[in-house]
Image (tube, rainbow, N blue to C red):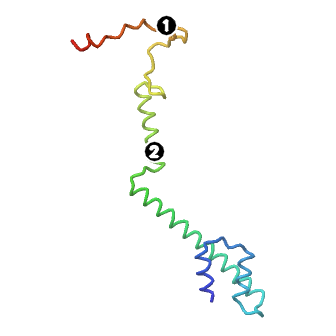
């Protein structure tokens, strides 16, 4: 009968509260069972329930890792390592975080906003096709 209860709880994968465990223990034991027996069975059910939740969590985690590895998805550690490597290479190459090279001399912001050069007229199709 205890095995039937275990199967039911496994199927439901519920968190077994102390009250629920005590209720199940009372149902499993004879009506005239002593308080110590009920307490012991209640504790065993609680431990058993926690153990099964831990096993299920480990199983699901392992399965997810295996599936992601099979698909070639990088782990967080691998991505973090690559980010660090890119930052180190950018620093070594004198690049900024945006990927632009640092200028040799720092120009004031006012000079960098100079008027753009006059645009040349676009070539016509006739002159472009002769070339």
72 and 91: which is toward the camera: 72
Front-lying residue, 50 or 127: 127
Q: CA distance from mark 2 to mark 1?
A: 42 Å
Q: In terms of depth relative to the viewer, which is nearer, 125 or 95? A: 125
Relative to residue 62, is residue 31 depicted above or below?
A: below
Crowding around mark 2 (Cα neighbors within 10 Å: few <14, some 14 to 19, many 20+) is few
Residue 34 at x, y = what percent?
A: 77, 90
Q: Furthest-front residue in view?
A: 126
Give the tally of numbered discs: 2
Element type where label 1 sits in the image: loop
Image quadrant where one finds the C terminus: top left
Q: Position of residue 126 (x, y in %)?
A: 26, 11
Q: Which residue occupies the foreground of this view, 127 or 47?
A: 127
In the rendered image, the vertical position of residue 119 relative to residue 100, given as above or below: above
Marker disc for residue 79: 2
Q: Answer left or right for 93 relative to 20.
A: left
Taking the spot 50% from the left edge, 8% from the top edge, the residue there is 114
Badge 1: residue crowd in 10 Å (few <14, some 14–19, many ≥20): few
Going 39% across and 55% down the picture, which residue do you hit? 71
Q: Is residue 44 above or below residue 70?
A: below
- The residue that mark 1 highlights is 115
Residue 81 — which label?
A: none
Q: Quadrant of residue 20?
A: bottom right
Q: Residue at x 44, y 27 (%)?
A: 99
At 62% from the left and 77% from the top, the residue drawn is: 9
Indicate the secondary structure of the residue bearing disc 2.
Answer: helix
Is the residue 61 above or below the residue 37 in the image?
above
Spot occupied by residue 95 in the image (x, y as percentages of width and height): 44, 25
Q: Earlier in the sequence, mark 2 or mark 1?
A: 2
């Amino acid at each position: 009968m205890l095995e039937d209860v275990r199967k039911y709880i496994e199927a439901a994968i519920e968190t077994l509260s102390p009250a629920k465990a005590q209720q199940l223990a009372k149902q499993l034991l004879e009506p005239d069972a002593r308080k110590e027996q009920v307490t012991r069975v209640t504790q065993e059910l609680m431990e058993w329930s926690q153990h099964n939740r831990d096993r299920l969590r480990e199983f699901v985690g392992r399965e997810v890792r295996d599936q992601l590895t099979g698909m070639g998805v990088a782990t967080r550690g691998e991505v973090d390592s690559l980010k660090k490597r890119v930052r180190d290479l950018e620093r070594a190459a004198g690049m900024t975080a945006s990927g632009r090279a640092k200028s040799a001399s720092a120009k004031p912001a006012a000079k960098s906003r100079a008027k753009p050069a006059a645009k040349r007229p676009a070539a016509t199709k006739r002159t472009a096709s002769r070339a």
